[in-house]
Image (tube, rainbow, N blue to C red):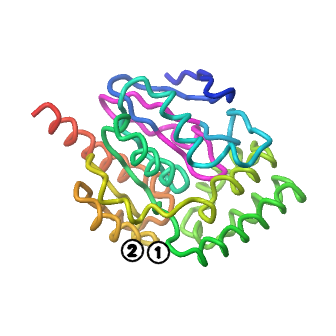
Amino acid sequence: MESTTFVASDEVRYCVRTSGAGKTLLMLHGFSGSGRVWQGLRFAGWRISAVDLLGHGDTDAPAAPARYCLEYAASDLAEMCAQPAFVLGYSMGGRLALYFALHYPEKVRGLILESTSPGLESEQERAARAASDSALADSIERDGIPAFVDQWERMPLFATQTCDQRAALRPIRLAQRPHGLANSLRGMGVGVQPSLWGRLSEIAVPTLIVNGALDAKYCAVGERMAALISSAKQIVIPDAGHTTHLEKPEAFRTVVQAFLRGAKGRELG
C-alpha cells in the first residue's frame, strides 16, 4: 500500500510517495512527471520512496528559477535522506541522481541511471540548449499545460510509446503547473547544468545504466558512461525506447531487481 507524506527542506515542501518494505530505493522521475510514474513497480525487499521533484506533482513550485538548480535540488535530497540509499533516476531525475552521488557520496549506496546523461560538454552546446529550454518555458507559461502536453507527446523521443502508454502519462502531465515546469527548465535544464562528464570516474558505488535499444542516442551515451564509471554496467532492453520503465516494465523490473539483489549480496559478503 502506498502512503504519501510531505517533507520540508529549506522552506520547500516535498511530496514523497512510499511503498513496500526493506532498504530504501529513492526514485526520481523525469521532466513533466511525478512520483506517480513509478506506481506498479515493486522490488522485493525494498522500500520505494518516490519523490515529486521541485515544480512537479504535489511538491512546491517556488517562484525563483534559481531555486530549482541541481545544487539546491541535491541539497534537498541530502536533507531528506536520513540514511544512505540506492537512487534510481530517469532522464532529468537521472541527471539529479548523478549530481547527488558526486556531491553527497556518503548518502548514496548505489545508482540506477535510466535514459540519462551527465549533461552537455561544450559551452556552445549548453548555450544552444539553454536558449531552447528558455523558449519552451516561455511557451508553457504563455500557452498553458494542455498545449505543452500535446506538443511533448509528439516528440520523436517518445515515438516508441503506445497510445495506451501515452494515455497513462497524460493525466500526470496535465496536472502540472505552468510556472513549475517552466522554472524547472530554466533552473534545472540540461543547458544550465554543469557538465559531469569529467567527474564520472569519481563514482565508486555499484551503478546500473539502463537504456532502451530503440533509443540510439542514449544507448551511445550510456555506453560511454559505463566505460568511465569503473563500478558500472550497462544493460540495453530490447524493443524499448527512452521510457524503458513504461514501455517494458517487466523487463525493467527484472534487470533492476537483479542488480539490487547483487548489490545487497556484495554488501553482506
- The residue drawn where x is 72% and y is 71% is 132
**At which x and y percent is residue 218?**
45, 69
Q: Which residue is mark 1?
A: 217
Q: Helix or strand or loop: what does disc 1 sit on?
A: helix
- In depth, the one of 250 and 47 nearer the eye is 47
How many residues crowd around disc 2 within 10 Å: few (fewer than 14), some, or many (20 or more)?
few
**At which x and y percent is residue 25?**
39, 35
| Quarter occupied by residue 158 | bottom right
- In depth, the one of 217 and 124 nearer the eye is 124
Would you place residue 248 above or below residue 125 in this image? above
Which stretch appears magenta? 27-51
**At which x and y percent is residue 170?**
69, 50
In the picture, measured across the screen, residue 83 lies left or right of residue 80, that is left
In the picture, measured across the screen, residue 40 lies left or right of residue 138, that is left
Q: Which residue is mark 2?
A: 220
Q: Helix or strand or loop: what does disc 2 sit on?
A: helix
Q: Locate the C terminus by quadrant.
A: top left
Residue 32 part of the magenta-drawn span: yes
- In depth, the one of 57 and 221 nearer the eye is 221
Q: Check disc 2 and give the amino acid type.
A: Ala
- The residue drawn where x is 61% and y is 42% is 34
